[in-house]
């Protein structure tokens, strides 16, 4: 049994230490918001936070997460009220929606590290997250909106 802390809750999982974290999250812990996209860390659909860092869970081994905090899209906020989640809804970013849990998780780390990003900053930070529907202009707009929301909540 491997013990993982996912979204603040301890899970004892019967997992091979070499299993990709994605499958432990989805299949063993039952949290399906994190998506399988490519399986080779190229699309970003599987993005989660591991001790605050954005990682691609499809290539991150379970044993790397032992003793660390794993945050999935389900744990980013209690009521979908993280500034990025609010902005995503306000701007109506998703088209098919498949990639957006990974997009949101990447954007949350960007705004934590850079609370007022430029378009260029956003493009660099989000470059590893692929949206097959091409909602990139709405993603950028939502990140700017989330930055404004975040600034208001800090005041």
Image (cartoon, rainbow, N blue to C red):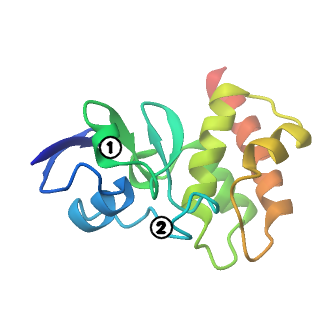
In the picture, measured across the screen, residue 96 lies left or right of residue 2, that is right
Element carrying mark 1: loop
Asked if residue 144 is positioned above or below residue 132 in the image, the reply reads: above
Picture disc at residue 7:
1
Res. 85 visible in picture: no
In the picture, measured across the screen, residue 79 lies left or right of residue 149, that is left
Between residues 137 and 28, which one lies in front from this camera angle?
28
Residue situated furthest front in the rendering: 18
Picture disc at residue 35:
2
Residue drawn 84% across the image and 47% down it? 123
Q: State the image coordinates of residue 96 (x, y, percent, origin top left).
A: 64, 79
Q: State the image coordinates of residue 113 (x, y, percent, origin top left).
A: 67, 26
Quadrant in which the C terminus is drawn: top right
Q: Of marks 2 and 1, which one's residue comes earlier in the chain?
A: 1
Residue situated furthest left in the rendering: 1
Res. 73 visible in picture: yes
| Label 2 environment density (alpha carbons within 10 Å; few <14, some 14–19, many ≥20) | many
Number of numbered markers:
2
Between residues 104 and 81, which one lies in front from this camera angle?
104
Marks 2 and 1 in Cβ contact (< 8 Å): no
In the picture, measured across the screen, residue 1 lies left or right of residue 101, that is left
| Label 1 environment density (alpha carbons within 10 Å; few <14, some 14–19, many ≥20) | some
């Amino acid at each position: 049994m491997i013990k993982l802390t996912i979204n603040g809750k301890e899970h004892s999982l019967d997992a091979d230490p070499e299993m990709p974290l994605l499958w432990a999250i989805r299949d063993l812990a039952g949290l399906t918001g994190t998506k399988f996209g490519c399986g080779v860390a190229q699309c970003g659909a599987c993005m989660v936070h591991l001790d605050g860092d954005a990682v691609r869970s499809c290539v991150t081994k379970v044993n790397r997460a032992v003793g660390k905090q794993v945050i999935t899209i389900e744990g980013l906020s209690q009521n979908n009220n993280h500034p990025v989640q609010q902005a995503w809804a306000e701007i109506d970013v998703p088209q098919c929606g498949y990639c957006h849990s990974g997009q949101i998780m990447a954007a949350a780390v960007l705004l934590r590290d850079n609370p007022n990003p430029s378009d260029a900053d956003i493009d660099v930070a989000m470059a590893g997250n692929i949206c097959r529907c091409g909602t990139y202009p709405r993603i950028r707009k939502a990140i700017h909106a989330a930055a404004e929301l975040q600034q208001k909540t800090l005041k």
